[in-house]
Amino acid sequence: MCLVTIEDEFEIKAIAGLKRGMVEEPAHLALTWLSENRWIVVPRLSASHFNDLDAGSLSEALIEKKYPLLFGLATEPLASFPTCFALATSKDGLLRFSEKCGLFNFVLVPADRSIAVLCTAYDYFLVAGPPQFVRHAVGGEIGVAWKHFEQEALDPCWEGRLKKVVESYRNMGSGSA
């Protein structure tokens, strides 16, 4: 099992509850919820969720936390596309998810809600959770990852979109840990 579409209505409703209070739909995490959990957030540049390197780092961090699977939940209404998936935390599972869902906004979350990865259709994704997890998931130091994203956000090609992400989450991890 790398990626499974969940189709049962009752199961979807139960799983969709995992994102309650966590996501400000469609493409942001709730700042209040992040603060209450004392989570670190690192934004990453992304064309369609994960590239090979990002999938590898994230998979290693998830496996280290002993998560065999995540739930992928749409954070926007989707009329003719599945809104709920179960995916393996392997690199292959993450890449298959990206391939299938790369054009849509989704949050990836384990059943215990102890971390979150918000995948957006707006050229970035967010890794959120305890500092040790985030550090491993982004493949290095949090401050370095933040500086890289901040530098990218200054590029005029983004027309200010990524600067708003920096402003929103700066106090949730920029230079921290």
Image (spheres, grey):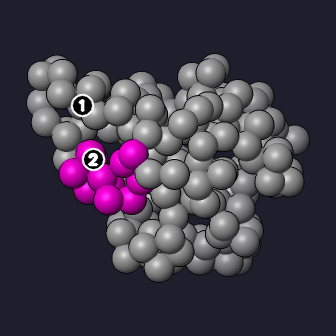
Residue 102 in view, yes or no: no
| Image-based side of 34 in relation to 56, left or right | left
| Image-based side of 158 in relation to 60, left or right | left
Q: Relative to the observer, which residue lies in front, 52 or 64?
A: 64
Residue 150 vs 78, above or below: the answer is: above
Using the image, tell me which numbered label, if any, was put on residue 165: 2
2 or 1: tag closer to the N-terminus: 1
Q: Residues within 10 Å of mark 1 (few under 14, many from 20)?
A: many
Residue 58 in percent (x, y) is at: 67, 38
Q: How many numbered markers are drawn?
A: 2
- Residue lying at 24% horizontally and 31% vertically, measured from the top left: 153
| Image-based side of 107 in relation to 166, left or right | right
Q: Relative to the observer, which residue lies in front, 73 or 24?
A: 24
Residue 104 in percent (x, y) is at: 44, 42
Q: Identify the magenta region.
A: 165-175
Residue 64 in view, yes or no: yes
Q: Is residue 168 magenta?
A: yes
Residue 174 vs 109, above or below: the answer is: above
Residue beneath label 1, please?
153
Residue 100 vs 72, above or below: the answer is: above
Q: Are marks 2 and 1 in contact (CB under 8 Å)?
A: yes
Secondary structure mostly seen in magenta is helix
Looking at numbered disc 2 in the image, what kind of residue is underneath it?
Val
Q: Residues within 10 Å of mark 2 (few under 14, many from 20)?
A: many
